[in-house]
Image (tube, rainbow, N blue to C red):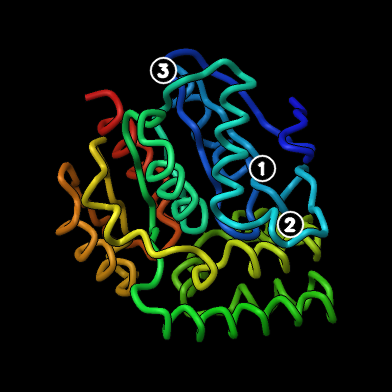
């Protein structure tokens, strides 16, 4: 479906039957991130799968403030209102996980259970945020000046995704095609507006979350394992699962294990 949300045309896919499950993809992804899970999860959940602002078939506005993570979270709330859905289970991957956590902090009564895959509550200090904003601005400039393909060539080679090189060629080609289909404006402005350095730190608000929270990390993703370990200490009702033989993108690298973990958590 296409929906006008706060002046932006959003693409949202809806399928399945059961308690609503809102799925949020990562940076450079789109709703197709979750296609392989739709059959299994859709048997027990009503899946709501948007292309996040600046990605996929959703519009990429010129106004950077529209990409701020709080603004994007408010768009999600408006999408749920449009669908007449009050409460959801919520799953987000990487950037989508930061957005999912933002939504849960801002609208806690709208979230029953929260799953964060390879996600962070942001950076703890302003010094870290300033440095990260500088790096994200450099990347955004690179995209604006060189276009999508050179950026995707670079993005595929960063250490965070090194374990994905073990995947079958067909899977990596599909992921690359999704990345290349994005808008240069959308990706550049997402970095500037929704990057880790631009968002608030949600470390303290973690303590106020009442919903059950599942943290999922790949055992070979050392950075996000450290983050999850620290997050767990701040959560009242948190669980952390690490998945062997996986890096950052568990939903791709260990798809069946990930699907089983999520289903088990949501329907226990």
Number of numbered discs: 3
Q: Is residue 15 left or right of residue 113?
A: right
Q: Nearer the viewer, residue 104 or 168?
A: 104
Disc 2 target residue? 177
Crowding near the residue tagged with mark 3, few <14, some 14–19, many ≥20 C-alpha atoms within 10 Å: some
Do the residues bearing badges 2 and 1 touch, measured as CB atoms within 8 Å?
no
Q: CA distance from mark 2 to mark 1?
A: 15 Å
Against 258, residue 228 (above or below) is below
Task: Verify CB contact (< 8 Å) between mark 2 and mark 3.
Answer: no
Could you tell me if the residues under marks 3 and 1 are in contact, i.e. CB atoms within 8 Å? no
Residue named by callout 1: 51
Q: Quadrant of the C terminus?
A: top left
**x and y percent of residue 267 in the render?**
28, 23
Q: Nearer the viewer, mark 2 or mark 1?
A: 1
Dot 2 or dot 1: first in sequence order is 1
Q: Is residue 69 above or below residue 248?
A: above
Name the mark on residue 130: none
What residue appears at the point 59 percent right and 85 percent down from the top-left corner?
134
- The percent coordinates of residue 11 (x first, y second) are 73, 35
User: Nearer the observer, disc 2 or disc 3?
Assistant: 3
x, y percent for residue 193: 63, 64
Under tag 2, what secondary structure?
helix
Residue in the image at 26% along x and 33% along y: 265
Residue for badge 3? 19
Residue at position x 40%, y 66% from top? 122
């Amino acid at each position: 479906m296409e929906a006008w949300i706060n002046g932006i045309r959003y693409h949202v896919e809806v399928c399945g039957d059961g308690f609503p499950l809102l799925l949020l993809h990562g940076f450079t992804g789109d709703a197709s991130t979750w296609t392989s899970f739709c059959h299994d999860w859709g048997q027990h959940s009503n899946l709501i799968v948007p292309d996040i602002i600046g990605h996929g078939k959703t519009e990429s506005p010129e106004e950077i403030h529209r990409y701020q993570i709080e603004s994007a979270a408010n768009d999600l709330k408006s999408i749920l209102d449009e669908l007449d859905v009050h409460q959801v289970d919520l799953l987000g991957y990487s950037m989508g996980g930061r957005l999912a956590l933002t939504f849960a902090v801002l609208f806690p009564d709208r979230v029953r259970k929260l799953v964060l895959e390879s996600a962070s509550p942001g950076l703890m200090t302003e010094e870290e945020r300033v440095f990260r904003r500088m790096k994200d601005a450099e990347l955004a400039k690179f995209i604006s000046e060189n276009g999508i393909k050179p950026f995707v060539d670079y993005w595929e080679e960063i250490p965070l995704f090194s374990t994905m090189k073990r995947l079958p060629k067909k899977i990596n080609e599909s992921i690359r095609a999704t990345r290349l289909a994005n808008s240069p404006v959308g990706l550049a402005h997402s970095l500037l507006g929704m990057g880790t350095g631009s968002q608030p730190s949600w470390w303290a608000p973690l303590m106020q979350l009442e919903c059950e929270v599942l943290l999922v990390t790949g055992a070979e993703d050392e950075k996000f394992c450290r983050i999850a370990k620290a997050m767990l200490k701040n959560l009242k009702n948190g669980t952390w699962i690490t998945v062997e033989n996986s890096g950052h993108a568990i939903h791709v690298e260990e798809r069946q294990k990930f699907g089983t973990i999520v289903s088990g958590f949501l329907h226990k």
